[in-house]
Image (cartoon, rainbow, N blue to C red):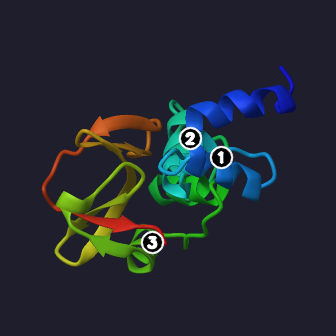
């Protein structure tokens, strides 16, 4: 079916208001409230998918990918590939994000583990109380349940 054949049936299904929108944008149907899959993928959700794609990559202190990572190296790499720039260390990344509450967290936000005011680890929130992270020497990038309440959340701007 060609684009010109689709337009009448799309216009009939979309209704008059969308038909006017269709005419205004030169043939592309725009339906309010219906985001395309590409538009719906935010940098945070892209970063989350990128981190997940690194499952099994070995932890290496100071590594920023693409084959091995430390914790902040994984978040740095994932967000860079998603089009966002982050500083190098977990502490610097915490200072660069917009701080949010646990209630406001969503998939793709950063989870910062802290002792007092010292941030010592970071991962990417995957939902369901789990994060993608590069845990420690001898381990690999993996999905893991958050194991402590001593966490802060940050949203990459």
Q: Nearer the viewer, residue 107 or 110?
A: 107
Question: In the shown orientation, is residue 5 left or right of residue 42?
Answer: right
Residue 43 is drawn in which quadrant? bottom right
For the view shown, which residue lies furthest in the front direction? 16
Which residue is drawn at the image coordinates 75% and 56% (left, top)?
25
Q: Is residue 69 visible?
A: no
Q: Are marks 1 and 2 in contact (CB under 8 Å)?
A: yes
Q: Residue at x 51, y 32 (%)?
A: 55
Task: List x then y, in percent, for residue 101.
Answer: 21, 67
Res. 34 in view: yes
Give the structural element (helix, strand or loop) at label 3.
helix
| Residue 25 located left or right of residue 49 | right
Mark seen at residue 15: 2
Which secondary structure, mark 2? loop
Residue placed most toward the observer, 152 or 16: 16
Q: Residue furthest top?
A: 1
Residue drawn at x 52%, y 43% as measured from the top left: 51
* Disc sitting over residue 19 in the figure: 1
- The percent position of residue 122, horizontal first and vertical second, equals 38, 58
Check disc 3: other Cα within 10 Å, few if <14, some if 14-19, many if 20+.
many
Q: Are marks 1 and 3 in contact (CB under 8 Å)?
A: no
Q: Nearer the viewer, residue 104 or 8?
A: 8
CA distance separating discs 1 and 3: 46 Å
Q: CA distance from mark 2 to mark 3?
A: 47 Å
Q: Position of residue 26 (x, y in %)?
A: 81, 53
First in sequence: mark 1 vs mark 3? 1
| Residue at numbered disc 3 | 93
Can you say whether 40 is above or below 89 in the image? Answer: above
Q: Nearer the viewer, mark 2 or mark 3?
A: 2
Between the C-alphas of marks 1 and 2, the distance is 6 Å
Q: Is residue 10 above or below residue 51?
A: above
Q: Earlier in the sequence, mark 2 or mark 3?
A: 2
């Amino acid at each position: 079916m060609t684009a010109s054949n689709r337009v009448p049936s799309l216009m009939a299904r979309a209704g008059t208001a969308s038909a006017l929108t269709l005419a205004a944008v030169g043939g592309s149907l725009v339906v309010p409230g219906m985001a395309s899959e590409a538009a719906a993928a935010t940098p945070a959700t892209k970063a989350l998918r990128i981190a997940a794609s690194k499952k099994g990559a070995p932890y290496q202190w100071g590594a920023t990918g693409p084959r091995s990572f430390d914790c902040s190296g994984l978040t740095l790499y994932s967000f860079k590939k998603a089009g966002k720039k982050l500083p190098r260390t977990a502490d610097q990344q915490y200072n660069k994000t917009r701080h949010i509450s646990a209630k406001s967290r969503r998939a793709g936000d950063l989870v910062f583990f802290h002792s007092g005011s010292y941030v010592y680890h970071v991962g990417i929130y995957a939902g369901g109380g789990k994060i993608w992270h590069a845990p420690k020497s001898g381990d690999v990038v993996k999905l893991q349940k958050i194991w402590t309440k001593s966490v802060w959340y940050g949203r990459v701007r």
